[in-house]
Image (cartoon, helix red, strand yellow):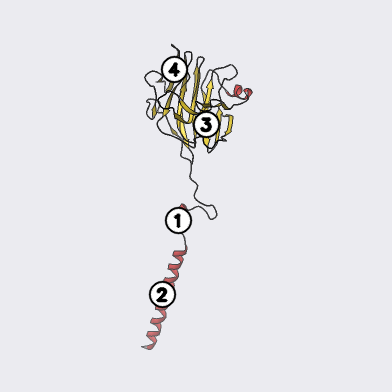
Amino acid sequence: MKSLQRHSAFWTATLTVAFTTGLHAEAAAPSDAATCDKAPAGAGTTVAKPRPPRPLFDGRTFTGWEGDTANSFRIEDGAIVGGNLKAPIPHNEFLCTTQTYGNFILRLECKLVGPGNAGIQIRSQRVPNHHEVSGYQADMSAGADGGYWGCLYDESRRNRMLARPERDVIKKALKPDGWNLYEIRCEGLRIQLAINGVQTVDYTEADDKIPATGIIGLQIHGGPPSEAWYRNITIEELP
């Protein structure tokens, strides 16, 4: 009987130690979920990833946009068209997003028909009770030397050109009578513009009072009969 008790005590102690050791091992080993959710040691907090590009224009409707769609803007051949070729454009008009954006990469194809002037507003605001929009503009206009294509203008705010490319750069990049891919990258205080893959502007805002978020707008400038066409508009939002 004493021998049986000794064997029983021995196995009880052995099982207790093994069970306790197993619990400690489980507690020490991180789970798969914890390993995936946390950044590696020393990496700090998890870095947010950019959202995948998504269309801002569906090619058929003005969903997500607002502006004078009765007279100044229309949809034709899957593109947004500002202006017309039959009558003078009475004043600047803008078709704007209903949503605001801060850090992003905006890509769209643009072309001008006639002696036009237009542009893409970014980080902008509508002027209350007025047709104007105030903010940064990725500019474009007709002209033998490339016009204002690839320039960064401050529309209805400081009313001056903030940055512009060398004429040789824009003349080589631009397709004056065709579609041009405009890429606009806004990240923090920095704004970069590119035409057909060629960088034209790399600008850093020095005034921290200038808003870093706002609407996106498509302009047709007041002036002689002309049209500005915009299509394949996508945005990739950045952290």
Report the residue marked by disc 2.
16
Q: Measure the C-alpha gap from mark 1 to mark 4.
A: 56 Å
Q: Nearer the viewer, residue 176 or 206?
A: 206
The span from disc 4 to disc 2 (Cα, nearest Å) is: 84 Å
Upstream in sequence: badge 3 or badge 4: 4
Residue extending farthest to the top is 86
Q: Position of residue 58 (x, y in %)?
A: 40, 28
Q: How many marks?
A: 4
Which circle, 1 or 4, is nearer the viewer? 4
Q: Position of residue 208 (x, y in %)?
A: 53, 37
**Circle 3 sits on which residue?**
184
Q: Earlier in the sequence, mark 2 or mark 3?
A: 2
Q: Is label 1 in contact with label 4 (beta carbons under 8 Å)?
A: no
Crowding near pointer 2: few (<14 within 10 Å), some, many (20+)? few
Question: Can you say whether 206 is above or below 156 in the image?
Answer: below
Disc 1 to disc 3, C-alpha distance? 37 Å
For label 3, count other residues whose C-alpha is less than 10 Å away and answer few (under 14), some (14-19) or many (20+): many
Q: Earlier in the sequence, mark 1 or mark 3?
A: 1
Residue kind at label 3, given as amino acid type: Ile
Hey, what amino acid is under mark 4? Gly
| Image coords of residue 36 (percent x, y) | 46, 52
Badge 4: how crowded within 10 Å, few (<14), some, or many (20+)? many
**Residue under pointer 1:** 34
Label 4 sits on residue: 83
Element class at badge 2: helix
Q: Is residue 227 left or right of residue 4?
A: right
- Provide residue 100's location: percent of width, then percent of height: 43, 34
What residue lies at 43% left-to-right and 71% top-to-bottom? 20
| Point 47% across, 28% down: residue | 134
Q: Amino acid at mark 1?
A: Ala
Secondary structure type for disc 4: strand
